Image (spheres, grey):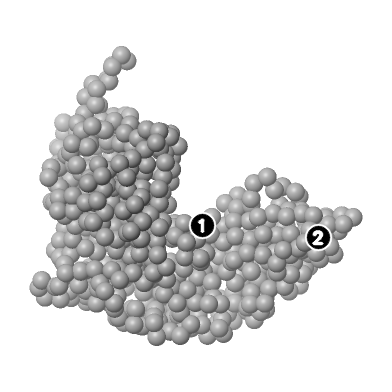
Amino acid sequence: MGVVTTKPACLPLDVGRIRHDFPILSAQVHGHPLVYLDNAATSQKPSVVLDALHAYYTQSNSNINRGVHALGERATEAYAKARDVVQLFLNAQSVGEIVFTRGTTEAINLVAQAYGASHLKVGDRVLISQMEHHSNIVPWQMVCQQTGAGLDVIPVSDDGELMMGRFESQLTDRTKIVAIAHISNAIGTVNPVSKIIQAAHANGAVVLLDAAQSISHMAIDVQSLDCDFLAFSGHKTYGPTGIGVLYGKAALLADMTPYQGGGGMIRSVGFDQTTYRDPPDRFEAGTPNIAGAIGLAAAIGYMNQVGLPRISAYEADLLDYALQGLESVEKLRLIGRASNRAASVSFVIDGIHPHDIGTILDDEGVAIRAGHHCAQPLMSRLGIPATARASIAMYNTKHEVDALVRAIQRAIEVFGV
Amino acid sequence: MTDLAELYQDIILDHSKQPRNFGELSEANRHADGYNPLCGDHIEVWIRIDDDHVGKVHFSGSACAICTASASMMSQALQGKSHEESGVLFEQMRQMLAGTGDGDIDQSGLGKLAALGGVRRYPMRVKCATLPWHTFKAALDENTGQPVTTEQ
Ligand SMILES: Cc1ncc(COP(=O)(O)O)c(C=O)c1O
């Protein structure tokens, strides 16, 4: 089975040590050790992140860019430092290209409204794919409705890959925005985003990359990818909820209208005229999630310390092991068989609904996701209402994959299929 | 019995694998759609009502074992009930499935339907069991301008 990654550059990941850093992983669920395989929904948090939040609230808590007092300075500095950490992590050219948001969803809505609404007109096209998360569909539908632009959808093959031949013919000079998932949250497909970005640029379109599922699994360099916008969520990258990032090329951000109005984003306010600050502040109206940004920076620090190439290699190995284990279950059918895939595996079992699989697995301490994964158009395309999905993070083990397979066998026993 | 064994009792598995009164009812004069937007489950309920009595209840859709068994058992339990009686049963079921206290729920009139009570230990699954009943109620009351959702 093909995998995402580069070869390990150094020593393999020491999963025992890593697990030690995540306090929740020693929890018991229904009398069993927790086996957490719902990482595509949200990942668990290492102590360094929890400690950073605690330290912020016990030593630095204050509003930013306002008070002249000591705490105000500390908080302002820590928030600014967090932005630097994100800039380096993505290899963005300048720190002004990093906008903090609530998450991927808000980042995409921000681009749809602050860029899309002023750049799209009647007859223009926005190109997305059939495997998008609802959060990379609905904001585009909304802005298309506002502007009179239309939505085109790259179809997906039976194996769960983008049909690139169709993409090439769908991409025309009327296409102004291409918004695409780097990795599908529902079936783990890794999309050929470099190719898509190059082709889109050749046609004069800008590209938004939904990196919600890729950012914690592979090294990403926005300059070498050359994406115009990139969105991700802190909570899927070992960081807190309520914080996320929009990366945007400086020239594009500079040309965008504000997303929301309020404090922190203005240069001066008068009833006749209000002028806005430069990016990224222009897009961060109101008191931001200061603690969240600091927690995210700590999570990025943790990933950097382990090393994304090492994480990718470890997860690819575990994916191979999981695919072998799952394929050995006779009644189980994998959904999505892309040749380039990430460590998120969807499956169905004839005669057992995914929700029932989820409940029985939970009884064994195994946490997976069951449902449509906020990708109803993809589910319809694949002709299934829902799947069960096991998604891997750097702290999962072969032992846990064995527990998953055993729990699935138990579900098959309970249902007698 | 463990919670899991109580949830997936034989009678539940039996109804989920061989649902009774499954499929569209051609002579129906009432119909409603029900959705669980969180998980994507969708069922349809058809009713034939004559002289204020529920003649037949049918359902279709793709849903989990709990939802399917609940719908199947519901279709049997409601047959022949008056409009008022079915409203009472709906209310009893709603209380049993969503209710919190174990002791003070009157299950005497529920018969086999009491087997669905195992769902109470699984808060995330309660809506699976209640969806058919809410859909039935909407069809019965001809309150079908909007499909039923478990978010109501
Ligand atoms: C591919 C993808 N895009 C977008 C999102 C939305 O992320 P959030 O809910 O954190 O805004 C998710 C989360 O599930 C996702 O997997």
Which residue does the image show at 24% across and 77% down from the upper left? A317
State which chain disc 2 sits on: B
- Secondary structure of the residue carrying tag 2 is loop
Q: Chain of mark 1?
A: B
For the N terminus of chain A, which image quadrant? bottom left
Residue identified by numbered label 1 = B38
Q: Is residue B35 left or right of residue A189?
A: right
Please rate how many residues cluster around mark 1, counting C-alpha atoms within 10 Å: few if below 14, some from 14 to 19, many from 20: some
Tell me what residue is drawn at x 18 percent, y 61 percent: A219
Q: Residue A326's x, y, as percent?
A: 39, 80
Q: Quadrant of the C terminus of chain A?
A: bottom right
Secondary-structure class at tag 1: loop
Seen from the viewer's position, the closer of residues A230 and B122 is A230
Q: Nearer the viewer, residue B133 or A128?
A: A128
Residue depicted at 63% across the width and 56% down the height: B34
Looking at the picture, does residue A302 appear above or below residue B138?
A: below
List the residue tagged with mark 2: B27
Percent x, y for residue A184? 35, 61
Apparent side of residue B105 relative to residue A373 in the rendered image (left or right): right
Q: Amino acid at mark 1?
A: Leu
